[in-house]
Image (cartoon, rainbow, N blue to C red):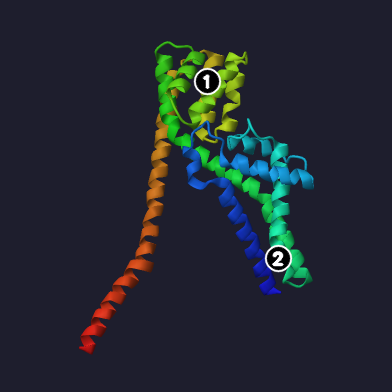
Amino acid sequence: MTAGLVLAVAAAASFAGAVVEGLAAARGAGSRSERRPPREEAWLARLAGVGRRVGSLAPSRGLDELIAAAGLAARLRGEDVMAAKVGAGALGSLAAAPIAAMLPGRMALMIVVATACAGFLVPDLSLRRCARVRGKAMSRELPDVVDLLRVALAAGLPLTRALAEVARRRRGLLAAELRAVVARIELGMAPSRALASLPASCPVEGVAALVAAVERADRHGAPLAPALAVLAAQARAERARRVREQAARAAPKMQLVVALLLAPAVMLAVAAALAAALLD
């Protein structure tokens, strides 16, 4: 019984990890060209095709926000992701079928259910991972974008023109979202309403603060440049803090490598030299 449970959990975890790696395109997602469709979209579309044949479900609460944070709101709907979840669950149960066939009744059912549940959660994990990668990339871009916006406003440009100039002169994910905001404003949407949708597609804390500062300035008529200067300084301080944390986490990893690899290698070399000296 215990061995069967271990095998079921291991198979489910292996399936989930393999599909997440295939869907998420790991670290390179934040540095892709903004015109190139993310690999997540292609995989989710294929899984959605399988899920629609099996039978889709109604979108869960918060799924649209997750899709927007992953940068796929323009190309994927909640129904598509739910179909992808059903398709991943079906493929997971099919992948577990050969292993389940070698197990007794209860264990076979358990491993099929476990892999189906793991597959059902894979699209959510992929979207969350994509959102995290996008958030890290945008956090690196945020200080420069806010500073450039402050300079444009200090030069006398109106807010819409300043946003357009920043979006035109900058590259990256955050600039692409600003271009989408400018496009909505040019189509007749109110600037406050167009900016209100920005935090959902930009999973960075500083973006919400930027939108709030713009709304306060628009409501009360206060100058926006000083608030933007404070936001840029805070964003740079937050980025420096994250760099220090990464450096602090790197030191124990290096010590672990030294302890597990270099130290035994040195000890083996010393032992070999002592053995050769004793044999002589």
Up-down relation of residue 180 to residue 247 (above or below): above
Q: Mark 2 points at which residue?
A: 98
Image depth: mark 2 or mark 1 in front: 2
Which of the 4 image quadrants contains residue 130? top right
Figure quadrant of residue 4: bottom right
Q: Classify mark 2: residues with Cα within 10 Å, few (<14), some (14-19) or many (20+).
A: few
Q: Mark 1, residues whose alpha carbon is within 10 Å: few (<14), some, or many (≥20)?
A: many
User: Residue flagged by tag 1: what amino acid is it?
Assistant: Val
Residue 109 place in picture, x, y as percent: 77, 65
**Residue at screen point 45% across, 11% down:** 157
Helix or strand or loop: what does disc 1 sit on? helix
Which of these two is toward me, 222 or 268? Answer: 268
Residue 66: percent from left, percent from top: 63, 38
Which residue is drawn at the image coordinates 74% and 65% (left, top)?
Answer: 110
Q: Can residue 152 be seen in this view?
A: yes
Label 1 belongs to which residue? Answer: 214
Going 62% across and 65% down the picture, which residue do you hit?
10
User: Can see residue 226?
Assistant: no
Q: Where is residue 64 in the image (x, y as percent from the top left)?
A: 67, 35
Sequence-earlier tag: 2 or 1:
2
The Cα atoms of the two marked residues, 2 and 1, are separated by: 58 Å
